[in-house]
Image (cartoon, grey):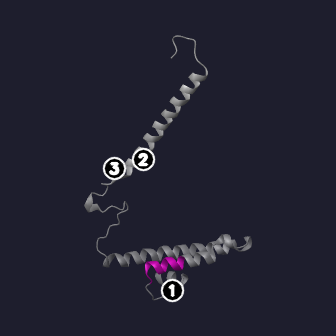
Amino acid sequence: MQGDEARTLLGFPPSSHPTLSQVKAAYKRKVWESHPDLFPAQQKPHAESKFKLISEAYSCLLSGTRRQGSSSVTNTRVVRTGVPRAQGGRGNAALIRVPFLFIILGTVALGGLNATRAYKKEKAAYPSHNPFLP
């Protein structure tokens, strides 16, 4: 699909240069208008073909805007961990692990405490006459 054709299909003038956010917004709007599930059974084949054309136009314009934008943008990296790479990147792993460690140890300790209490209560209710049992 040509760029002019894709722009016209998404509602832009043929010689325009839409930004990435404009392309995404136009794609979402067109998808909501022409999604095949919104049409009755007899109109679904036409809606499916239009939906495929819109998706193809979106991918065409998306790859075109990325190619255009990549020449003007210098090396930018998105850090997905939320911690800047200059500070080690994953230096806060201990801060994340500590609460989980406390939760696990607390659960085990309270579980053991409850088991000990239940054992003592059972032993008091039903004393054993066997000298080998505690």
Label 2 near label 1: C-beta < 8 Å?
no
Question: Does the stretch in magenta take in 24?
Answer: yes
Name the residue located 48 percent from the left edge and 79 percent from the top edge.
Answer: 23
* Towards the viewer: 87 or 75: 87
Say whether disc 1 or disc 3 marks the residue closer to the N-terminus. 1
Name the residue located 45 percent from the left edge and 83 percent from the top edge.
Answer: 18
Q: Which residue is mark 2?
A: 100
* Towards the viewer: 103 or 50: 103
Residue placed farthest to the top in the image? 131
Residue 20 drawn at (x, y percent): 44, 78
Q: Is residue 66 left or right of residue 37?
A: left
User: Type of residue at label 3?
Assistant: Ala
Tell me the mark number nearer the camera, choosing from 1 and 2.
Answer: 2
User: Type of residue at label 1?
Assistant: Phe
Name the residue located 38 percent from the left edge and 52 percent from the top edge.
Answer: 96
Tell me the mark number nearer the camera, choosing from 1 and 3.
Answer: 3
Q: Is residue 83 left or right of residue 16?
A: left
Q: Is residue 79 left or right of residue 14?
A: left
The range drawn in magenta is 18-27
Q: CA distance from mark 1 to mark 3?
A: 51 Å
* Towards the viewer: 77 or 98: 98
Name the residue located 62 percent from the left edge and 78 percent from the top edge.
Answer: 33
**Number of residues whose C-alpha sits closer than 10 Å to that of mark 1, classed few (under 14), some (14–19) or many (20 or more):** some
Label 1, secondary structure: give it.
Answer: loop
Q: Quadrant of residue 15?
A: bottom left
Question: Does the stretch in magenta take in 130?
Answer: no
Say whether disc 1 or disc 2 marks the residue closer to the N-terminus. 1
Label 2, secondary structure: give it.
Answer: helix
Label 3, secondary structure: give it.
Answer: helix
Q: Is residue 1 visible?
A: no
Q: Which residue is mark 3?
A: 94
